[in-house]
Image (cartoon, rainbow, N blue to C red):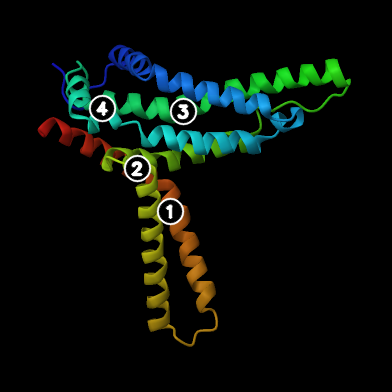
Amino acid sequence: MITNNTLNLNRLYRLTINDLKFNSKLILISSATIVLICALLPFHVTADTTTYFFILYVGGFLITSSAFNDLHDKMKAYQQLMLPCSNLERLLSKWFLTSAGYAIGLLIIYYLFSLLSLGINILIYKEIFTPFNILQASLWLNIGKYIILQAIILLGGITFKNHALIKTTLSLGVLFFLLFSTITIFTWIFCPNCPQAWQLITQTLHSIYFTLWIVIAPICWIVTYLKLTEYELR
């Protein structure tokens, strides 16, 4: 019997393959766009992580924001919810394809283009530059940051039916503005003449910032799962 929190790795694998086939057109378009961008880059640029991170964040957030579009469509939602899988498996499939799966897939494509650029540069210009280093710690640290921030966009994708990325970004902006305003007001009330008032505000925001990096992703995943279970009750 399949319950909402059942996890079967074989079934999860089949569901992930099914999601890949279901979104094959989007994947092909995204892959072609990435290949085109990499092909237009100067040879030395592909050795830098800046462009990779730009494609990772922009492309990843766009793909993630549309991850649950099928559930927002009544006809497609019926087909998806009738699949023999649990909601946990359904969420894990969406999460993997738009987070770690996307990041690693993009990394492979980008690394291959870096090697190709290096070969062409040596063959034509007789020059050697340092290829894209996939073992550097900062690269994987930023991929980890992407996975954490991606959890917010995943929650926005299931919460908003249309323009999910824009609405999620605006919601975050309003939330941070309210948070900053609240901290500023409380600091002004309890320490109006304190010479270190701004420093206190900055330290408080930094503390909240580091705390959010720890708890934000799990909270978003849990809320996304709960919202996913609501679709079966509609």
Residue 73 is drawn in which quadrant?
top left
Which amino acid type is shown beneath numbered disc 1?
Thr
Relative to 145, say whether 97 is above or below: above
Q: Nearer the viewer, mark 3 or mark 1?
A: 3
First along the sequence among labels 4 and 1? 4
Position in image of residue 118 (x %, y %): 77, 21
First along the sequence among labels 2 and 1? 2
Relative horizontal placement of residue 222, taking residue 125 as reference (left or right): left
2 and 3 marks in contact (CB < 8 Å) = no
Disc number for residue 211: 1
3 and 1 marks in contact (CB < 8 Å) = no
Which amino acid type is shown beneath numbered disc 3?
Ala
State the SS at label 2: loop
Disc number for residue 100: 3
First along the sequence among labels 3 and 1? 3
Q: Quadrant of the C terminus?
A: top left
4 and 1 marks in contact (CB < 8 Å) = no
Which amino acid type is shown beneath numbered disc 2?
His
Mark pair 2, 1: CA separation: 29 Å
Position in image of residue 11 (x %, y %): 28, 13
Position in image of residue 134 (x %, y %): 64, 27
What residue sits right under mark 4 in the picture? Answer: 88
State the SS at label 4: helix
Disc number for residue 163: 2
First along the sequence among labels 2 and 4? 4
2 and 1 marks in contact (CB < 8 Å) = no
Badge 4 density bin: few <14, some 14–19, many ≥20, Cα 10 Å: some
Q: Nearer the viewer, mark 2 or mark 1?
A: 2
Relative horizontal placement of residue 147, taking residue 223 as reference (left or right): right
Mark pair 3, 4: CA separation: 17 Å
Between residue 165 and residue 215, name the one nearer to us: 165
State the SS at label 3: helix
